[in-house]
Image (tube, helix red, strand yellow):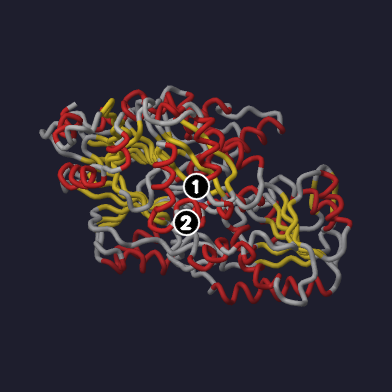
């Protein structure tokens, strides 16, 4: 390939290069020379500035020491302060993955620690943070991410070759097919096509559709989608209505790359494995099994936020913080050389939250924006966060003072951490002498938050780094892992119980309802959206008695709803986001909202920004340029 030949021109005579490979959009040079491996920064700088490609130099197998010997040395070189947990050697890539509780202590000031490691063992170090909470689910997810490095090496090279194929310059067009999640919430899926490229963004399930109904999944049978021609899949965030069908694409024959952030990859593994587990426990069949998830993970490429990555001959991808859940990203695609720029927001929050920074508006150019409309309706105005907190805490205290239990139904990812973050300050106060139980996958999601502090708000990031302050490590917090522990929690005195599922449609919350709903001393506080038809919505509307686990239960507990903890932007925040974008869009398409809200948001944005807006329906195709 031309580009690899171009790289050769920049290499010094004594570089002793054994191989040059693509790694997706990047280039990796393998060398037999110790000197070149340890000192190549000038060469790399020149290649980066001339070819505009990221380059890394790694040792060939001739160079690096035996893993057993390297392990001994590394344990010596890496300070105890780093709390080294695991070393994973990947000889085919010349890489050693160093998993430690304190990566900073491995890396050292100005990367001094990494330099020392390279000198000592002649391996390329890659440092990962170990979660400060143990979780089997997270361990399993992270195991998958380092499986089969030989396969990955070949796969990433092939991806690199495809990205660099000659592009035709004849007919330049960009079009977007809405395959799911338009004028509805659920099964988000968009196909972006150009003369050169077929790119899918998100591929989710529809959690509110009846099981077995055709509304469950996106329109993957649309005539313009052929999985064999698909070049790339991009996942904005790990909620199931965006990620749930990604493994299915691999089951059906797609074998190309999946682009997302690292936390999104890990959360997707966690969610999809759980989805399969639940389906089995209910005697139903999931649309794929764990081997499809493995296939996806092996092909996942995880750019950093803000990093520009070529993904096809004519499309460049940049992911930026979306502020919605851990790892969530706004997807920016630059098509052609300045032909068209698309911003697909996915779910985003333009408000400061406890855990996350607000969505990033720093995009150099945006011609078409596709925005979610979950709370884009005319009357969607969120309660300010401070008011929400006050209301929540006052209800909680009232119940605890009566000696009752507070049940908070939450989704495992997102809202539960928001609530924990808010409770963290309270847990330090004298009055709070009560246990906080977490049931469902909340603790596993917490663990992943502690592994990626760089994706969190500055405030929480600092707290996690100073472990004694971490909101996830307070001594009052108890993760429930068994039936017996759940029973103990229910038999204990006053307590706060955070439990899944968030809309009371199944999961451990059902046991708590069955045993605690009839006691007027207890309370249930809703902090998230309860969809039409869910048991959560019924309880919220005052229904009593209710059917739980085949029993009739009187609802005598207090029921309270607190809005204002949303992970989505409300109408005004969406308008502000559009206004504050560094480059304002010429056209906005709305999706991910009830039909009425998609239309209302389109009309609002048209009036306030004086731009073209549309609310396409599913299966509509829109030409963007
Ligand atoms: Zn979401």
Query: How many marks overall?
Result: 2
Q: Position of residue 136 (x, y in %)?
A: 66, 40
Who's the residue at 73% across and 51% down the image?
439
**The N terminus lies in quadrant:** top left
The answer to whether 418 is drawn above or below residue 59 in the figure is: below
Mark 1 or 2, nearer chain start: 1
**Residue positioned most to the left:** 170
Mark 2 surroundings: few (<14), some (14-19) or many (≥20) residues within 10 A: many
Residue drawn where x is 28% and y is 36% of the image: 27
Residue 263 numbered mark, or none: 1
Q: Is 496 situated left or right of 471 in this image?
A: right
Where disc 1 sits, the SS reads helix
- Alpha-carbon span between mark 1 and mark 2: 8 Å
Res. 30 visible in picture: yes
Secondary structure of the residue carrying tag 2 is: helix
Q: As drawn, which residue projects farthest toward the right?
A: 491
Mark 1 close to ligand 1, CB under 8 Å: no
Which dot marks residue 515? none
Closer to the camera, 102 or 498? 102
The residue that mark 2 highlights is: 455
Q: Residue at x 50, y 47 (%)?
A: 263
Considering depth in this image, is 400 or 614 the residue closer to the camera?
400
| Mark 1 touches mark 2? (CB < 8 Å) | yes
The location of residue 327, given as percent across then percent down, is 47, 51
Q: Position of residue 229 (x, y in %)?
A: 31, 26
- Taking the image as shown, residue 222 lies to the left or right of residue 609, namely right
Disc 1 crowd rating (10 Å Cα; few below 14, some 14-19, many 20+) is many
Q: Residue 5 appears in which quarter of the rendering?
A: top left
Q: Is residue 157 left or right of residue 103?
A: left
Mark 2 C-beta to ligand 1 under 8 Å: no
The foreground one among 393 and 541 is 393
Asked whether residue 155 is in view, the answer is no
């Amino acid at each position: 390939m031309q580009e690899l030949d171009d790289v050769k021109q920049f290499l010094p005579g004594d570089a002793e290069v054994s191989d040059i490979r693509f790694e997706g959009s990047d280039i990796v040079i393998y060398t037999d020379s110790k000197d070149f491996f340890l000192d190549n920064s000038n060469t790399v700088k020149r290649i980066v500035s001339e070819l505009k490609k990221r380059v890394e130099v790694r040792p060939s197998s001739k160079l690096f020491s035996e893993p057993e010997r390297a392990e001994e040395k590394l344990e010596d070189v890496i300070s105890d302060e780093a709390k080294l947990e695991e070393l994973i050697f990947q000889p085919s890539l010349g890489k050693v993955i160093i998993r430690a509780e304190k990566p900073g202590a491995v890396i050292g000031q100005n990367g001094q620690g990494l330099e020392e490691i390279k000198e000592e063992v002649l391996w390329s170090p890659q440092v990962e943070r170990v979660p400060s909470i143990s979780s089997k689910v997270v361990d399993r997810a992270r195991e998958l991410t380092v499986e089969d490095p030989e396969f990955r090496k070949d796969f990433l090279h092939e991806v690199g070759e495809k990205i660099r194929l000659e592009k035709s310059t004849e007919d330049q067009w960009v079009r977007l097919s809405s395959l799911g999640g338009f004028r509805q919430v659920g099964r988000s899926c968009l196909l972006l096509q150009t003369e050169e490229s077929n790119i899918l963004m998100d591929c989710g399930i529809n959690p509110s559709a009846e099981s077995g109904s055709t509304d469950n999944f996106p329109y993957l049978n649309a005539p313009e989608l052929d999985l064999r021609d698909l070049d790339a899949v991009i996942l904005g965030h790990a909620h199931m209505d965006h990620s749930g069908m990604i493994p299915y694409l691999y089951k059906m024959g797609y074998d190309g790359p999946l682009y997302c952030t690292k936390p999104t990859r890990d959360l997707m593994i966690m969610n999809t494995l759980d989805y399969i587990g639940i389906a089995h426990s209910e005697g139903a069949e999931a649309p794929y099994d764990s081997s499809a998830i493995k296939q996806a993970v092996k092909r996942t490429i995880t750019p950093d936020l803000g990093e520009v990555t070529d993904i096809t001959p004519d499309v460049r991808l940049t992911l930026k913080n979306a502020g919605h859940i851990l790892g969530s990203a706004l997807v920016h695609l630059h098509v052609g050389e300045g032909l068209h720029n698309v911003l697909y927001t996915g779910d985003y929050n333009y408000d400061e939250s406890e855990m996350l920074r607000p969505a990033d508006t720093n995009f150099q150019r945006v011609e078409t924006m596709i925005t979610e409309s979950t709370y884009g309706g005319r009357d969607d105005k969120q309660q300010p966060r401070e008011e929400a907190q006050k209301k929540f805490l006052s209800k909680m205290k009232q119940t605890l003072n009566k000696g009752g239990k507070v049940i908070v139904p939450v989704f495992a990812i997102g809202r539960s951490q928001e609530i924990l973050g808010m409770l963290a300050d309270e847990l330090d106060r004298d009055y709070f002498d009560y246990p906080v139980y977490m049931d469902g996958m909340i603790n596993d999601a917490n663990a992943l938050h502690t592994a990626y502090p760089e994706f969190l708000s500055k405030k929480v990031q600092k707290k996690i780094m100073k472990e004694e302050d971490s909101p996830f490590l307070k001594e009052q917090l108890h993760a429930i892992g068994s039936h017996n522990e759940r029973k103990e929690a229910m038999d204990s005195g006053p307590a706060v119980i955070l439990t899944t599922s968030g809309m009371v449609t199944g999961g451990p919350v059902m046991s708590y309802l069955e045993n605690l709903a009839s006691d007027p001393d207890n309370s249930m506080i809703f902090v998230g959206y309860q969809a039409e038809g869910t048991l959560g919505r019924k309880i919220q509307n005052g229904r009593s008695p209710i059917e739980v686990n085949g029993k009739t239960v009187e609802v005598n507990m207090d029921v309270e709803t607190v809005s204002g903890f949303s992970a989505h932007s409300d109408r005004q925040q969406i308008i502000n986001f559009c206004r504050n974008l560094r480059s304002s869009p010429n056209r906005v398409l709305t999706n991910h909202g009830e039909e009425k809200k998609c239309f209302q948001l389109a009309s609002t944005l048209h009036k306030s920004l004086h731009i073209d807006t549309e609310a396409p329906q599913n299966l509509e195709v829109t030409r963007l340029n």
